[in-house]
Amino acid sequence: MKKNSGILLIIIGLLFFNIKLEAQSLGKLWGTIFEEGIPNAGGILFYYDPTTGKDSIVYTFPSANENSSNLIQASDGNIYGVTTDFGPNGSASGGNGTIFKCTPSGTVSTLVTFPGTVNTINPICIIQGSDGNFYGMVSGNALQKNYGSIFKCTLSGILTTLVNFDSIHGSYPGYLIQGKNGNLYGVTGGGGTYNQGIIFQCTMAGTLTTLFSFPADSKNNIDPLSIMQAKDGNFYGITENGGSANTGTLFKCDTLGNLTTLVNFTGAANGSYPMGNLIQDTNGDLYGTASGTFTSPTAGTLFKCTTSGTLTTLVNFKDTNGSNPQAGVIQGSDGNLYGTTGNDGTSHMGTLFKYTLNGGNQTTLVNFPYNNPETTLRCQLLEIKNSATGIESIKTENNDLTFYPNPSHGVFTFMEHGVKDKVNLEIYNMFGKNIYNTQCNTGATQIDLSGRPTGVYLYRMVNENGETIGSGKLIIE
C-alpha cells in the first residue's frame, strides 16, 4: 500500500506541474577535427546525426589551425569553441587564436581575436561560468617565455586576463572546470615547487592558490592533463606520464590538496598514456580513454574506474575499431558513452564510436572519410538536441528566464535577463516535497542540488503576486 501511495503522489505531482516525462533520445554529437598539411584547411567543425546515421561538415576553418579541446553550448543557445591559431574567415592576424561562435543553424563567426601579447596567445579550452561569462586558458609559448593564463570573456566579447602563470606558480595549463563552490580549478603541466605542474584553485576574481605541486619523481605523476570534480566533492584526474611504468596515472585529490594515486597505467595490462577528460556516470563510476601507442598490443583503451581505484578495461582499440583515442568520452542523454579515436577505422582517419553500458558493446558509428593522414580528433564531443539540449527557456510578459545545463550533475544556473518581476523558485522531489526555495535576482543564480539523489525533480517559478509563471523538470544525472 505504501508503494502504491508513493506512485499516486508522483502522478499527482506531474499533473499539478503539467509535466510529461519522456524517454531520452540522443541528440546530435558535435566535435572538431584538427587537420594539418592541407592548403587553406585548418580544421573541421562537424556533427553526427543519430537519426540519419551520418556525419556532416558544418564549417571548414580556412587556415592552419588546431581547434578546441572542447565545445560548449552557452546560455544563449549558441555553440562556442576556440582555435589556437587562425579563426573563421582567416581572422586572428598573426595566428594568435580566437573564440568562435556557431549558431544552431551552422553560421560561424569570430567572437574574440586574441591579441598575441604576453600570455594571450593560443587558447586551448573554454567553459561558461555560473555568472554567464566564459572562462578558459591559453597554453603559452615556451620560446617567448609565455607561461599561459586564465582568461574571462563576456558574451559580447570583452576579454580580460585573470591570471598570468609563471614558472613558479604553474605554467602551460591544461583543462579548466568550475567547482561546486563556484571557484575555477585546473592543472598545469609545468611550474610549481618541483616544476612538474600543479593543481590550482582560482576565484572568479582571479586569486590563484596552489592545491598540490606534482613531485619530481617519475614514479609518481608527471604531465597532469585534466581534472574533474565528482559527486563526492573530490577531484579526479589523469597524468599522461609517470607512475610505476611511466605511462600515466589516475589520481584523486581532495579540496585540501591531499593527493592519492589510484591507478598506475602499465601498458598491455591496463592501457597507457591516458588523455582527454574523465567523466562520472549516473552510477558514480569514472570513465576515460588511454591513447596507447601504435607498437603496443592495443592502440588505446576505453576504461572504467571506481572512485576507490578499481580499473576495468572496457574496449581495446586496434586497427578496424579505431586507435589512439585522445579526447575522453561523454555520456549521452540515452545513457550510452560516445567518443572518438584519432586514427584507424576502415578509413584509417579515425572513428566516432558508441559504447553501450547496458550490454558492454562497442559500435563504430562513423569512419571519418576526410582524406588527410594528419587528421586528429582531440575534441570531446558535445551533445545538442534540436530543442537546444541543456537549456530551458521561459518567456512571459515581464520575464525572460533561462535554466542551464539541464540535465546536470546537480549544479544548475538560473539566469534572468532584464526581469521586471521578482521571481521565487521552488523545487520539489517526485513525491511533491518542497526541497529548495530561493528568490532569484537579475543575473545568474547558482542552484546546488549536488547532494541530492539522481533523478527527476520539478520546479515552479512564482512571481510576487503568487502567480505561477513557469514550471518544468530538472534532471540530476
Image (tube, rainbow, N blue to C red):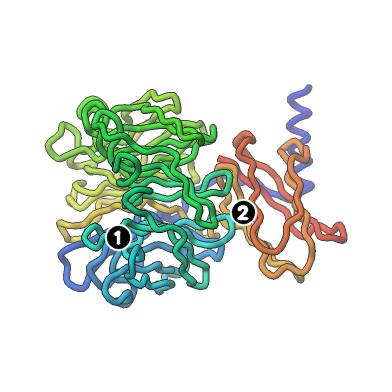
As rendered, which of 109 and 164 lies closer to the eye? 164
Q: Judge from the rendering whether residue 240 lies leftward or rightward of residue 25; answer left or right.
A: left
As rendered, which of 261 and 432 lies closer to the eye? 261
Disc 1, SS: loop
Q: List x then y, in percent, for residue 316.
A: 25, 33
Q: List x then y, in percent, for residue 58.
A: 35, 67
Q: Judge from the rendering whether residue 300 lies leftward or rightward of residue 468; answer left or right.
A: left
Residue located beneath label 2 in the image:
413
- Residue 300, compared with residue 343, is above or below; it is above
Q: Judge from the rendering whether residue 87 lies leftward or rightward of residue 286; answer left or right.
A: left
Instruction: Give the spatial CA distance, label 1 vs label 2.
Output: 34 Å
The residue under the point 54% across, 32% down is 232
Dot label at residue 2: none
- Residue 197, compared with residue 136, is above or below; it is above
Q: List x then y, in percent, for residue 152.
A: 48, 62
Closer to the observer: label 1 or label 2?
Answer: 1
Question: In this orientation, does residue 176 appear?
Answer: yes
Residue located beneath label 1 in the image:
146
Disc 2, SS: strand
The residue under the point 42% across, 34% down is 286
The residue under the point 36% across, 68% down is 98
Q: Are marks 1 and 2 in contact (CB under 8 Å)?
A: no
